Amino acid sequence: MMEIRYCKKCGFPLGCRPALYEVDGVCTACINAEKKKEIDFASRQKWLTQYIKENKGKGIYDCAIGVSGGKDSYMIVSRLMSNHGVTNPLLITSLDEFEQTEAGKYNLKHIAEYFDVDHITFRNKPRTVRREMLECFENNLNALKAVDDRIVGYNGVPAQIARNFGIKLLFYGESNFEYGSQDTLDIFHKDSTEDLKYIFMGAIYPYSITDSLNEARKCGFKDLDDFEEWNRYTVENYTQMDSYGYSTNQWCKYVKFGAQRVADIACRLVREGKLTREQALIYIRERDFILDKMAKKDMCRVLGITEEYFDEVVDKHANKNVVVKDYDGVWKLKDIVEANKGFGK
């Protein structure tokens, strides 16, 4: 079994996740957070205004924005329309097959109403999507691999719709720079072409979940607490809460790599100065291993499988160098299980 170590700055489990590296015990996500302090974002914002003016094309829409209805979606639309001369964006949503939360339903409807803009919601072939999800789950323990490619991939649904409308600019939120898997904070997606530029808003404004949330709330964004629904065992109730089953796919990363959404958010909040490393480590140890029952049930419904079969597939893919089952049969980081020996039965 490999030794689990934790980033010296944020507390993220090291050596588990592909494409996240470390330098002297500090994860590359923390290193990149320091790099952002040296970037002249004011100049990038000024540049973007002129770039949009010169490249928005001759169609009726200034640009396209891929939206889920989450806080980042609100932030992008708000900033483009308030600060960069965009008056007629096209919002594009590629739906998943999970049951939406009340907050998710509200936010997805409200975003177009608040900004008074056109909004296309696209649903892929449902049976085909569910079949693909089951195959991805069984083969890779990543049910949303194909779905995510369609949502955020350069040739995904938003990009295809943008091209069909003659739109040259497509905006999304943060890039992989935020997660430490690339060295530079590039404005354009690497596969951008002259016909369609894929722009990361997180490269124009220094991305933070706190900043996105504050901007979104000004525009009427609501979270799970506003609807008093679904009290998750997470760090917060305002990220990735549009639907139930989606978070199950996040949890699957835990048994493969030793960290999932709780670690992601807690450590990001450390970088943003909202939590201490010690607080993040408590969240990681006490909550990161938990699979929400409602989320699991919704995922199994969509995949058309029993919860027992779900567990069988998980057990097959679990990285036993990183996680082991405790006395209750729950997958946890091996150092947590070792530390808890003698406190169970």
Image: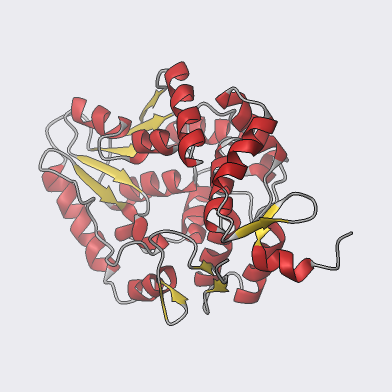
What is the image's colouring?
secondary structure
Tell me the residue at 40%/31% (across/down).
93
Residue at point 53%, 59% (across, down): 264
Q: Position of residue 344 (x, y in %)?
A: 86, 61
Disc tally is 0
- Residue at the farthest bottom position: 24
Q: On the rendered image, what quadrant is the N terminus found in?
A: bottom right
275, above or below 82, in the image = below
Q: Find residue 336 and report its image quarter.
A: bottom right
Q: Is residue 34 left or right of residue 253?
A: left
Q: Is residue 185 left or right of residue 255?
A: left
Furthest toward the right, the residue is: 345
Residue 259 seen from this side: yes
- Whole-percent x, y for residue 326 in the image: 75, 56
Q: Is residue 67 above or below residue 279?
A: above
Q: Is residue 104 left or right of residue 38?
A: right
Q: Judge by depth and name the residue closer to the eye, 308 or 126.
A: 308
Q: Is 231 located above or below residue 163 in the figure?
A: below
Residue 309 in percent (x, y) is at 64, 31
In this view, the residue in front, 245 or 80, is 245
